[in-house]
Amino acid sequence: MKRLLIVAHAPSPNTLRLRDAAERGARHPDIEAVEVVVKPPLEAGPDDVRTCDAILLGTTENLGYMSGALKDFFDRSYYPVLEEKQGLPCALYIRAGRDGTGTRRAVESIVTGLRWRWAQEPLTLRGEWRDDFVDQVEELGLYLAAGLDSGIL
């Protein structure tokens, strides 16, 4: 059984919808051999990363940067997992009220340092809320879980 860890900051009803969508996609009924673990960034840590086979990160854009909660997760997890989790497949979605570029750049920098590998291009959900954001994040969760299930990731 493979394990997909979803670490997503969800401070609002809409961002909670995104986190729920990621989980719903990852738990698609056709995916049989993937356990899905969902944690807010302040509750996730190095042990969660050590026991996963892929990670999906979700964050809001806060002042042109990732959420403080996701940054805290990285601060606590970076060095403890640096050597043993190189090559970990990962993906990211950003709920960006504006651009999301600074947020993406910051997360990409950390992921590069960890030597994780992108399973898919980061997804930036820009501008005013649109209901299709939910579908995009659900598809991202499905993609990662299906990749694990099939042995592609």
Image: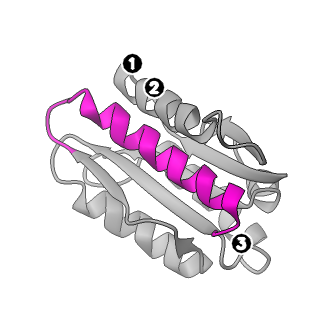
Q: Amino acid at mark 3?
A: Tyr
Q: Which residue is mark 3?
A: 79
Whole-percent x and y of residue 54?
A: 66, 60
Query: Whole-Å distance between the Cαs marked 2 and 3?
Result: 29 Å
Whole-percent x and y of residue 60?
A: 36, 42
Q: Amino acid at mark 1?
A: Pro
In this picture, residue 128 sits left or right of residue 73: left
Quadrant housing residue 97: top left
Q: Dots 1 and 2: beta carbons under 8 Å?
A: yes
Q: Which mark is residue 13?
A: 1
Q: Which residue is mark 2?
A: 16
Question: Which residue lies at the image location 61% right of the left edge and 45% below the top edge?
Answer: 6
Residue 11 visible to the viewer: no
User: Closer to the N terminus: mark 2 or mark 3?
Assistant: 2
Residue depth check, mark 3 versus mark 1: number of the one nearer the observer: 1
SS at badge 2: helix
86 or 102, which lies in front?
86
Question: Which residue lies at the image location 39% right of the left edge and 29% below the top edge?
Answer: 15
In this picture, residue 145 sits left or right of residue 138: right
Q: Which mark is residue 114?
A: none
Q: Amino acid at mark 2?
A: Leu
Whole-percent x and y of residue 62?
A: 31, 45
SS at badge 1: helix
The magenta span reads: 126-153
Quarter of the figure with the C terminus: bottom right
Q: Is residue 136 magenta?
A: yes
Q: Dots 2 and 3: beta carbons under 8 Å?
A: no
